[in-house]
């Protein structure tokens, strides 16, 4: 089952994804592989990363993939519950370092997600409901995130929106 979990900043989407991963792991007696995309480039981000680390169960394996997310998903053990947190940080990393390669990287991510046979939980920020960003890079980021979410929503069996800590299913269907 592939699930896209969307929500705004501090909406509870990561906590929801962790709860889902833990439940799937226990039900299937499967390990959890947490793929993280953040980089501690400043004190604020280092603090956010530490907060997420403290919330994760210590038994979970963690792979850092700020750029190589498609590879990390493809290389994950077939029996593992894979939790990716988060797609918008990965998108930002890609957009700020190699904007001309973004289409190819996004296609590679979609291919990896579609190829994944086991459980995959994808966390991402819904950024399209805010004000129009002032700068061109911010507008491109918002637009690319929206396109990425639409494409992932098509291939994921489940899509959920988290607001105030509560998840609302937007799409739910059994895999073919």
Image (cartoon, rainbow, N blue to C red):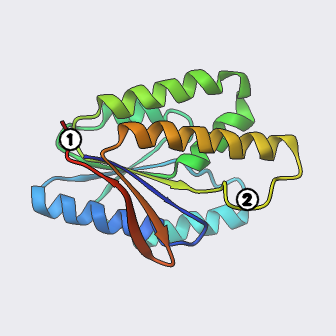
**Residue found 20% across the figure and 59% down from its top:** 24
Q: In the image, is 39 to the left or to the right of 79? A: right
Q: In the image, is 20 to the left or to the right of 141? A: left
- Between 41 and 9, the one lying in front of the other is 9
Task: In the rendered view, tell whether residue 114 sits above or below residue 164.
Answer: above
Task: In the rendered view, tell whether residue 156 sits above or below residue 165.
Answer: above
**Residue found 51% across the figure and 52% down from its top:** 86
Residue 128 drawn at (x, y percent): 66, 54
Residue 71 drawn at (x, y percent): 42, 29
Label 2 vs label 1, nearer the camera: 1
Residue 42 image label:
2
Q: CA distance from mark 2 to mark 1?
A: 41 Å
Q: Could you say whether the residue bearing mark 1 is in a helix, strand or loop?
A: loop
Q: Could you say whether the residue bearing mark 2 is in a helix, strand or loop?
A: loop
Label 1 crowd (10 A; few <14 / some 14-19 / many >=20)? few
**Residue found 50% across the figure and 32% down from its top:** 68
- Between 9 and 172, the one lying in front of the other is 172
Number of numbered discs on residues: 2
- Between 172 and 32, the one lying in front of the other is 172
Whether residues under marks 2 and 1 lie with C-beta atoms below 8 angstroms apart, the answer is no
Residue 67 drawn at (x, y percent): 56, 35
Label 2 crowd (10 A; few <14 / some 14-19 / many >=20)? few
**Residue found 73% across the figure and 62% down from its top:** 130
Q: Is residue 57 visible?
A: no
Task: In the rendered view, tell whether residue 80 sits above or below residue 24.
Answer: above
Residue 72 image label:
none
Q: Which residue is disc 1 drawn over? A: 175
Q: Quadrant of the C terminus?
A: top left
Q: Residue furthest right?
A: 134
Q: Say which label, 2 or 1, has the lower sequence index.
A: 2
């Amino acid at each position: 089952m592939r699930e896209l979990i969307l929500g705004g900043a501090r909406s509870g989407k990561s906590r929801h994804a962790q709860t889902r991963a833990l439940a799937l792991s226990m039900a299937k007696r499967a390990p959890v592989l947490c793929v993280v995309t953040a980089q501690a480039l400043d004190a604020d981000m280092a603090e956010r990363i530490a907060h997420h680390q403290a919330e994760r169960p210590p038994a979970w394996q963690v792979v850092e993939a700020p750029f190589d997310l498609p590879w990390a998903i493809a290389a994950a053990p077939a029996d593992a519950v894979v939790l990716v947190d988060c797609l918008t940080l990965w998108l930002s990393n890609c957009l700020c370092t190699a904007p001309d390669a973004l289409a190819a990287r996004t296609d590679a991510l979609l291919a990896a997600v579609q190829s994944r046979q086991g459980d995959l939980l994808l966390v991402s920020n819904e950024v399209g409901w805010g004000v129009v960003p002032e700068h061109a890079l911010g507008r491109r980021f918002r637009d690319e995130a929206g396109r990425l979410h639409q494409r992932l929503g098509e291939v994921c069996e489940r899509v959920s929106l988290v607001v105030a800590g509560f998840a609302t299913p937007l799409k739910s269907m059994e895999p073919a």
